[in-house]
Image (cartoon, rainbow, N blue to C red):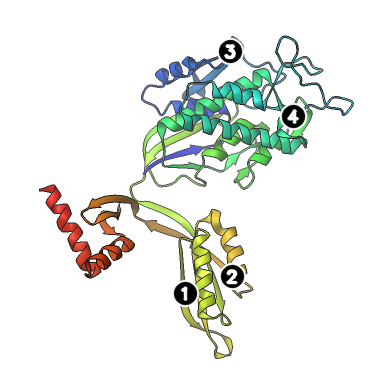
Amino acid sequence: MRILYLDCGMGAAGDMLTAALAELLPEPDVFVERLNELAIPGVRFTKERSVKCGIIGTHMSVKIHGGEEDAEHAEHGHGADGEHAEHGHGADGEHAEHGHGADGEHGHHGHGHLHRSMADIERIVSCLKIPEKVLNDVLAVYHMIAAAESHVHGVPVTEIHFHEVGAMDAIADVTAVCLLMNEIAPQEVVVSPVHVGSGQVRCAHGILPVPAPAVAYILRDVPIYGGGVEGELCTPTGAALLKYFATRFGGMPVMKTQAIGYGMGKKDFEAANCVRALLGDIRDKTDVVSELSCNVDDMTAEEVSFAMERLFEGGAKEVYTVPIGMKKSRPGTLIRVMCSEQDRENMLRLLFKHTTTIGVRETLTQRYVLERDIEHVMTPYGEVRRKNVSGYGTARAKYEYEDLARIAKEQDISIREAAGLINISRNKEKQ
């Protein structure tokens, strides 16, 4: 299984992720040329060599109309994204004008900078010659950023406006990362806990705590930490990209590394200011599952069966029961549910809703699993699904029960004989 691990020990920004992922490609310079051929309005990508704490990596420079974003609106810490939004309130508390002037451009706010709305950004991105999947990814990430700004400022997404330079900068970074993820095509993306920095940051609205409110909102339910570095290490664009593409957050998995990329930020710290991307392969797969258990002694067999069905429908990996003896010598049932950590809350709700338990125990368990895929096999008896599994030095295959049962009923034979018929027909095809 192809796996991508992103080490965000110094946070993340759009340009850093672009640079780190580009280094994983066999020909990163060719990819940069492709980015520039997209002709994002006014945007030019330049791949630059960068050294942080003696480590050589890449800084991806994004210039808008020949210049980088000015210091007033630059992202703190990394200074590349510049996507802080203006929510459109004037000094008197009334909404500022966002209408189009006679020349078709957006009106200015009081500070004299051109702004773009979310609708403007959607129009720009929709005109780019990129695959449909990448287009959908770009819009989803940008909507995540806009939704965070909307929540923080308490105004509808339609009233969120982005500094023009910062908006184009962020469009460039988001588009580049989405294209790279499509190119690299990892089957799993694991992201480390995210270092967000500490202290305060100055933006267009004044002085804000780190992480900035939009970053904190985007990274809900994500493991983050402050550390001893003062400044904003994770930008809204970086946060949204990590949240969108991450399969899970945690430590580096056991993997055979094939390529490593270093995407450098602008500032210098005592620690190397970079995002490190490691692309590799996992042949023997492990994961962590949550085992939820409860004991009941006042449920009928039908009620237990119904609860098990609801748990499976809710995403449980496994549900099983064990007969047990309980207090006062009552016969009871142990109900155990195996699920992924992200499904834990839903499983708990279902357990309390569909069983009579008043308490649930949890154990986190390391699980060793074989890789699996479903193959659709055409036979004289119709299409049959075959589950193939491999790993840990073994490989085997098994036809799905429902398909074998169908053939067995149609041919009036046993399930074992049905599997034999399929194997005979496949062997004849190979001869």
Q: Quadrant of residue 185?
A: top left
Where in the figure is residue 269, as x and y percent of width and height? 60, 28
The answer to whether residue 79 of the structure is visible from this angle is: no
Amino acid carrying label 1: it is Thr
Q: Nearer the viewer, mark 3 or mark 4?
A: 4
Is disc 4 in contact with disc 1, using a CB cutoff of under 8 Å? Answer: no
The residue depicted at 47 percent of the width and 33 percent of the height is 133
- Separation of disc 2 and disc 1 at Cα? 14 Å
Is disc 3 in contact with disc 4, using a CB cutoff of under 8 Å? Answer: no
Q: Which residue is mark 1?
A: 321
Where in the figure is residue 282, as x and y percent of width and height? 36, 45
Q: Is residue 15 left or right of residue 2?
A: right
- Separation of disc 1 and disc 3 at Cα? 63 Å
The circle drawn on residue 159 is 4
Is disc 4 in contact with disc 2, using a CB cutoff of under 8 Å? Answer: no
- Separation of disc 4 and disc 2 at Cα? 44 Å
Q: Is residue 338 above or below residue 179?
A: below
Q: Is residue 358 left or right of residue 187?
A: right
Amino acid carrying label 3: it is Gly
Q: Tag 2's secondary structure?
A: helix
Amino acid carrying label 4: it is Glu
Q: Which residue is mark 2?
A: 354
Is disc 1 in contact with disc 3, using a CB cutoff of under 8 Å? Answer: no
